[in-house]
Amino acid sequence: MNITRYLSPLRIWYLLKRESARRWKDYLITISAFCGFYLLGVVIGAKTGGLDSSLHYSNFGSILFLFGFIFTSTAFREAHKKLLNHDYLMLPASTLEKFVAKLMFSSVGFAVASVLVYWVFSLIGKLVVEVFLGAYYPDFFIFDKIIWQMIGHYFILQSIFMLGAVWFRKGNFIRTIISLILFSIILSVLSSLVAWLVFNDYFWTFVRGDFNFNIDFSSGFDMQRLEVLGGGVLTLFKIIYFGLLAPVCWFGSWLKLRELEVQDGV
């Protein structure tokens, strides 16, 4: 099987160029507006003496996560709109190539652009604060470990909003947030039920006021076993979060996109 029929780097590159050319005005307006708000906040912070290194973490985190998730949620808006989906369906590219292009644009592309744009913002802010206001302004280090940890978490969590971008036809960002809240509630209820069933004896001894971790109850648990169990649950969570969440969401997004194109094509 010739894989280039379904996944060609050249066609993906053309899709990325098309996406940039179509929306560059929107990006420029958004960046300009945010720059204005950023400088206003920097000036106010300099006047009140509230500028420190944590400024960059909070500001960059807001750009990366809030705007990144909103940006990702609009990735497939043309596939959902009747006036635009004809041109989308007629693109000379496979479903996989369209998905990979959108994924690269909203994940790697947005992350790199956020770092570079915020770095420029920080230089402008430093010029304004130190030259014109005579106050201290902390430097922004592109290769800061915390910054790239944020980007790593963004790649993982962005996959959820990519799935929402394909799954929902309208209000993708809000509906994805609502879905996450409902999922969290259901997971909390199920976890509480499991904890109730497993640690039922512990619960009642705690209510009676004679709770002691070192005593073996009828369930057969003791403090050491609880620590082992807690470590196992934490390891399972890390495996799901770091290893499975993003690939599963991406794969689900691609399958849903295939289904969506078939429905629109018919």
Image (tube, rainbow, N blue to C red):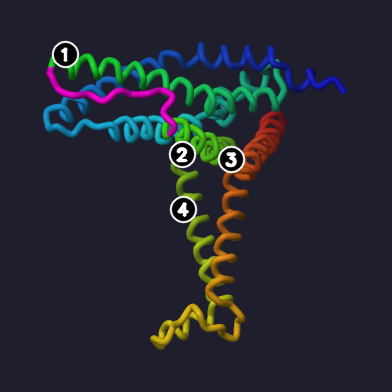
Q: Which one is closest to the eye, mark 4 or mark 1?
A: 1
Question: Between residues 97 and 199, which one lies in front from this camera angle?
Answer: 199
Q: Is residue 194 left or right of residue 121?
A: right
Tell me where residue 253 appears, x and y as whole percent: 63, 37
Q: Nearer the viewer, residue 82 or 147?
A: 147
Left or right, 84 with respect to 144, comes to right
Q: Which amino acid does label 1 sit on?
A: Val
Q: Name the residue under label 4.
A: 181
Nearer the N terminus, badge 2 or badge 4?
Answer: 2
Residue sitting at x 48%, y 24% = 110
Q: Mark 3 and mark 1: span between their CA atoms?
A: 49 Å
Q: Give the range drawn in magenta.
A: 133-145
Disc 3 from disc 4: Cα separation:
17 Å
Task: Give the labeled residue for mark 3.
Answer: 167
* Real-space Cα separation, disc 4 to disc 1, in angstroms: 46 Å
Which residue is identified by label 1? 131
Mark 1 to mark 2: distance in Å? Answer: 40 Å
Please tell me in which quadrant of the rendered image residue 57 appears: top left
Image quarter hosting the C terminus: top right
Q: Residue at x 63, y 37 (%)?
A: 250
Q: Is residue 141 magenta?
A: yes
Q: Position of residue 30 (x, y in %)?
A: 36, 21
Q: Which of the two discs, 4 and 1, labels the residue nearer the N terminus?
A: 1
> What residue is disc 2 on?
173
Do labels 3 and 4 touch, CB within 8 Å? no
Q: Residues under labels 3 and 2: Cα distance? A: 11 Å
The magenta stretch spans residue 38: no
Give the label, 3 or 1, closer to the camera: 1
Q: What element carries label 4?
A: helix
Q: Which of marks 2 and 4 is in front?
A: 4
- Identify the disc placed on residue 114: none
